[in-house]
Image (cartoon, rainbow, N blue to C red):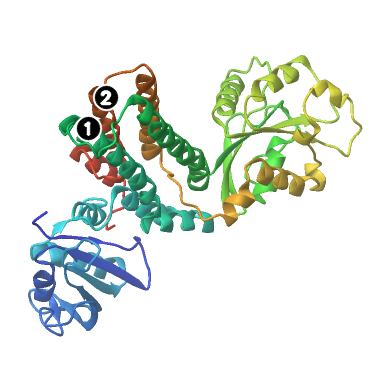
Amino acid sequence: MNDTICAISTAGGLGAIAIVRASGEDAIDIVNKIFEGPDLHKVKSHTINYGHIVDENKNVIDEVLVSVMKAPHTFTVEDVVEINTHGGVAPTNRVLELLMENGCRMAEPGEFTKRAFLNGRIDLLEAEAVMDMIDAKTETQRKMAINQIDGKTSNLINELRSDMVQIISNINVNIDYPEYDDVDIITNDLLIPKITNLKEKINKILKESENGKIIKDGINTSIIGRPNVGKSSLLNALLQEDKAIVTDIAGTTRDIVEGQISINGIILNMIDTAGIRETEDKIESIGVEKSLKTMEESDLILFMINNNEELTDDIKELLTKVKNKKYLVLINKNDLESKFDRGELMIDEDKIINLSVINNTGIDELKEKIIELFNINVLETKDPTYLSNSRSISILRKCLKRVNDVEKALKDNMPIDMIELDIKNIWEELGTINGTTYEEELIDEMFSRFCLGK
């Protein structure tokens, strides 16, 4: 990290302003070479300075404002200079070229944030939250990201590790200084409540992190049913646009059609699937297979039934497949005469929504039921301090399994010194969540997913 990096930090294309950022030991010196204005070595830190960017022949490239931020009080903990240019493609690229011609290296994706992490400015959870903030589409996603950036989520992990340090310290004192009379003798029976308490804390974080995943990734929602029950019409009604083709011809939808809606700050990733039925059409049968696979992978299934058709055995069979997941049964075309007995569905009434998509009735009730099913009102009002990415949740689940193993070993009277090694391993594993301990290869891979210039 001894070299100085640069990149365009604003979105590509035309805009009023573009920002070209440089960070590193020589950032001020390099920008000063191509800047006509105040001597950047002499200006105060965190000031904005007016002038022009010029090439080696003193040709003016652009009129700019240059922000100078001196180490260590910067995002990367290095000297950082940001050049605010006019937002055209040509002047922005030319400024970037001049920086590289004068000693900067083009930054890798996410390298500014990576330097902030490696220099101790932020931890790994806070670094991941930077991209979550950039990607945030709803106010709830923004709130969760800012809590992670502020370190509130990291505190959850730090508290777990602190509890484990206390346990490890107590064991070490017993092993290394058995002659101390004023130290409690740590036995398996004394350790079991401490480990059980640790397990409960991890379980609580994991449980609440299910909400974090919903906030970040949304609720994958598939619309399932036989052909011509109104699945595509429902998708269009929810999206309030003609996303899916709607006809009276059975089998019109042969592949999945996707869209997104927001309900109280939570994204629903809507998937309209091909109608499920026996078919000789090869293309349609592939669509049916995709529908069944999508159904298995969904967080929520909206199972649509035509009120004006009799219940068939294949509908009943499909219903049995969704009952182990979160689902709602939507009886569409409710304005037409019913041709089946609802008792045949053998499901609770609170799982049933009456719809007439063509008359736009029942849509609001459907949304309210989804809010209730996922406690979305609670998520909207509660301060969202959760783990939200698959990497950290997966590590915490692994740690929970190992804590369970420790608890079992204690109950089986495993020697304390062997238990201590297991607890230390869990402590180190927890450290990989916020980057207290890490492998360089993992860090490189993670930051490579960031956008260039961040």
**Residue beneath label 1, please?**
174
Find residue 151 and report its image quarter.
bottom left
Quadrant (top left/top right/bottom left/bottom right) for the N terminus = bottom left
State which mark lies toward you, 1 or 2.
Answer: 1
Residue at 80 percent of width and 40 percent of height: 355
Residue 268 lies left or right of residue 366; in this view the side is left
> Decide: marks 1, 2 in contact (CB < 8 A)?
yes
Q: Residues within 10 Å of mark 2 (few under 14, many from 20)?
A: some
Q: Dot 1 surroundings within 10 Å: few (below 14), some, or many (20 or more)?
A: some
Please name the amino acid that badge 2 sits on.
Answer: Ile
- In the rendered image, residue 314, in percent from the top left (x then y), is placed at 73, 16
Classify 221 as above or below 92.
Answer: above
Q: Residue at x 10, y 78 (%)?
A: 41
Instruction: Name the spot of residue 397 as percent of width and height, x first.
Output: 40, 31
Mark earlier in primary sequence (1, 2): 1
Q: Write the residue at 25% across / 79% down.
A: 65
Question: Taking 253 as reference, is 131 left or right?
Answer: left
| Quadrant in which residue 362 is drawn | top right
Report the front residue among 79 and 275. 79
Residue at which label 2 appears: 416
Vertical position of residue 183 compared to residue 367: above or below: above
Judge whether residue 206 can be spotted in this image. yes
